[in-house]
Image: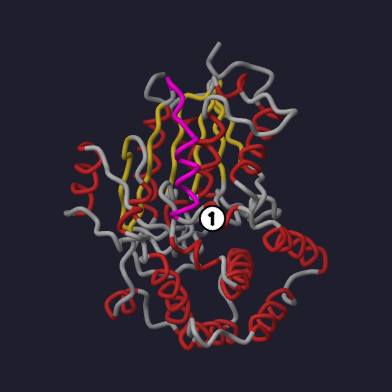
């Protein structure tokens, strides 16, 4: 009888895996199922439902519930693939001695884990989390959560909304603060486009982002230091990472994003996030092994500098274990959220960085991940 592999896709920061048809990992899941079938491998691919901004411990407990619900009837190997913060959830889950709750016995499942793949994960933190700790950052975080859901549902933001946000971010000043009513008005306008049922679902989801933001301080370069000091690798598990580096905001990047007003305005949002992500303290940049360094140099032509990032996470913060792929992409490109509407189903982009990442690069990247998952089979 063929071995059944269990693959768990763990969403990142404010992951919306629990919002009906809006699948965070939709393209990744489809690719995995098709590729495993082509290779004759029996597989079950599960998208984990995680608290959007709950603590890493809470989210690792969510991962446990997903595994316990679907993998308890056999002893097949388990593989964890985490995007962004989902990579940290996965590392904690397999860490020997991890305590996720009084009634949770992780060990029967953790010892079945064969691979942990992290994608664009802030293993050394991200300065953007520090920004989100402020009042403006908290408001903006909730709004960006809604933006992501809206674009994936309708294809793009209304131009009036995009113009207002772009103008706000362009004129915003850290000393002068902001007018919260503007963000509230944008929020209400976007929610108004959904059905009553979906609006209530979104309000609950965004309420979680507001009421439990335990994750945010844990993702600062200072906060992640404690996580790394207490979370250790499990012997026998193979760890691999996918690295993303996007173009810095520039005239060239704006031109590559196209002349469409919507693309230009949302590129302003990307530029705002990029500017806060590139402020990584030099002391927080980790040392890499010779093999990791060689992989980065081969992929990018030179070692990424301390300011290199994907718009959300510093590039060198993402390195962990074996570097499986290092690509020119923004934070959401690697999981299928880039601009290629002609593909079926369409790829939809909301973080328009001008990276040029497309379906061909997507398939090459995930084929490498499949090879890594099946390395010992």
Give the residue at x 41% y 65%: 277
**CA neighbours of label 1 inside 10 A, class few (<14), some (14 to 19), many (20+):** few
Quarter-wise, where is residue 314 in the image?
A: bottom left
Left/right of residue 332 with respect to residue 202 in the rendered view: left
Quarter in which the C terminus is drawn: top left
Asked if 211 appears above or below 186 in the picture, the reply is above
The colour scheme used here is secondary structure
Queried whether the magenta region covers residue 255, the answer comes back as: no
In percent of width and height, residue 181 lies at 68, 86
Q: How many marks?
A: 1
Residue at the spot of label 1:
345
In percent of width and height, residue 63 lies at 63, 37
SS category of the residue bearing label 1: loop
Quarter-wise, where is residue 287 in the image?
A: top left
Pick the front one: 46 or 247: 247
Give the residue at x 49% y 35%: 231
Asked if 231 appears above or below 213 in the picture, the reply is above
Pick the front one: 277 or 11: 277
Magenta-colored span:
221-236
Left/right of residue 301 with respect to residue 8 in the rendered view: left
In percent of width and height, residue 103 lies at 75, 28
Left/right of residue 199 with respect to residue 46 in the rendered view: right
Pick the front one: 112 or 230: 230
Q: Residue furthest top?
A: 1
Asked if 218 appears above or below 353 in the picture, the reply is above
Quarter in which the N terminus is drawn: top right
In percent of width and height, residue 242 lies at 37, 45
Left/right of residue 150 with respect to residue 274 in the rendered view: right
Asked if 303 appears above or below 340 in the picture, the reply is above
Give the residue at x 56% y 55%: 13
Queried whether the magenta region covers residue 223, the answer comes back as: yes
Quarter-wise, where is residue 295 in the image?
A: top left
């Amino acid at each position: 009888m063929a071995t059944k592999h269990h693959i768990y896709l763990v969403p990142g920061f404010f992951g919306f895996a629990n919002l009906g048809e809006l699948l965070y990992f939709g393209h990744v899941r489809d690719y995995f199922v098709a590729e495993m079938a082509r290779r004759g491998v029996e597989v079950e691919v599960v998208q984990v439902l995680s608290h959007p901004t709950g603590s890493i411990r809470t989210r690792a407990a969510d991962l446990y519930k997903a595994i316990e619900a679907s993998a308890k009837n056999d002893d097949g190997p388990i593989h964890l693939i985490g995007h962004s913060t989902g990579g940290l959830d996965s590392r904690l889950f397999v860490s020997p001695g991890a305590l996720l709750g009084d009634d949770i016995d992780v060990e029967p499942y953790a010892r079945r884990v064969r691979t942990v793949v992290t994608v664009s994960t802030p293993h050394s933190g991200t300065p953007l989390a520090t920004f989100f700790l402020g009042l403006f950052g908290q408001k903006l975080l909730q709004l960006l959560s809604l933006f992501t859901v809206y674009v994936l549902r309708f294809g793009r933001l209304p131009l009036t909304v995009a113009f207002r946000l772009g103008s706000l971010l362009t004129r915003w000043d850290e000393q002068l603060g902001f007018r919260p009513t503007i963000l509230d008005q944008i929020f209400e306008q976007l929610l108004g486009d959904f059905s009553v049922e979906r609006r209530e679902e979104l309000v609950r989801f965004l309420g979680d982002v507001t009421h439990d933001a335990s994750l945010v301080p844990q993702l600062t370069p200072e906060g992640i230091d404690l996580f790394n000091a207490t979370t250790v690798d499990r012997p026998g598990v193979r760890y691999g990472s996918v690295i993303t580096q996007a173009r810095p905001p520039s005239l060239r990047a704006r031109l590559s994003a196209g002349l469409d007003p919507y693309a230009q305005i949302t590129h302003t949002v990307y530029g705002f996030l990029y500017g806060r992500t590139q402020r990584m303290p030099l002391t927080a940049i980790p040392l890499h092994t010779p093999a990791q360094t060689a992989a980065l140099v081969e992929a990018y032509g030179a070692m990424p500098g301390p300011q290199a990032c994907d718009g959300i996470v510093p590039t060198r913060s993402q390195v962990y274990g074996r570097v499986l792929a290092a690509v020119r992409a923004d934070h959401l490109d690697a999981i299928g959220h880039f601009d290629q509407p002609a593909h079926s189903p369409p790829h939809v982009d909301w973080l328009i960085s001008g990276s040029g990442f497309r379906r061909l690069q997507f398939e090459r990247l995930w084929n490498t991940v499949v090879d890594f998952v099946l390395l010992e089979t």
